[in-house]
Image: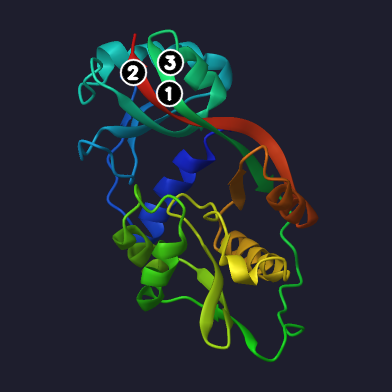
Amino acid sequence: MPESLKFHQTIQTYLNNKVWDFHFYVAKNWPEDPICLHFPGCTSTPNSLTYESVTVFCPSDRADLVDLLTSEDVLLDLTKPLYLNFTHEAIVNRFEKRYEAHDKITGDVYVCDNPPEDTSADDLPPDVELVRLQPEHMKAVHDLYPASDIECCEVFEKLVAELPAYGIFVEGQLAAWMVQSYYGAMFSMQTRPEFRRKGYGIYLARRLTKEVAARGYKPFVVIRPENDASRSLYSKLGFEKRFRTVRAVLRPR
């Protein structure tokens, strides 16, 4: 499933680092029907149900396989809203035959095939440091994270205990951060407002891109279409757009 980086690399992370305990479900006729019907997310949902947040993976030209959810996925209550994490837009379009999509957020997946060689931070000012983050830094990271209402601090603590994460510190204060996610991508970079437009992002992205690749992952990020700054930054590092994903709340028609 070439458009299912998140699926493949989450399994890889679990096998390598046991970061998170995942249970996922594929079609009964796998691999002839190449679809992961139910891939639980780590995000919180209004009802706090384990299987309510989900992603589905299959080749975009086989999106018709999504219809198997109605007969094979016994975990989902298809009469209730479904909280869909970033999923290929072709799959979401198929979902919309049965659901109405609300609160849609679009994100383009950019992949780096040739990570940068130079990851030096020697030219940072003397009062600025690029530091490997530790679990004790995660409270400050979580406070900056724009989706902190659906991602608990525990997720970040588990990630940085096993996977690379870096922060820019200015005079000892965390100014910007970036973390490898459990699915091999880099979490969206965040910078405190007072430290923006200082070029710190390129140092974080360059260092983490190289390290993620060195660990055997394909570096990728999800960028909102309107985020010109992020697209420009990652393009400089060799990231190229591969496909579009959508996050949405799906309500039965």
Q: Which residue is mark 2?
A: 251
- Place of residue 98 in the rendered image (x, y in percent of width and height, measured from the top left): 38, 9
Quadrant of residue 114 within the rendered picture = bottom right
Disc 3 is placed on an element classified as: helix
Indicate left or right for 189 with 200 as reference.
Answer: left
Give me the residue at 71% from left, 59% from top.
115
Q: Is 189 rendered above or below residue 83?
A: below
The reply, left or right, for residue 100 in relation to residue 109 is left
Q: Secondary structure at mark 2?
A: strand
Asked if the residues shown at circle 2 and circle 1 are in contact, with their CB atoms under 8 angstroms apart, the answer is yes
* SS type, badge 1: strand
Considering depth in this image, is 188 or 2 the residue closer to the camera? 188
For marks 1 and 3, the one nearer the N-term is: 3
Give the Cα distance between marks 2 and 1. Answer: 8 Å
- Residue type at numbered disc 2: Arg
Q: What residue type is disc 3 on?
A: Phe
Image spot of residue 216 (x, y percent)? 56, 58
Left or right of 54, for residue 231: right
Which mark sits nearer the N-terminus, 3 or 2?
Answer: 3
Question: Which residue: 49% across, 42% down?
Answer: 6
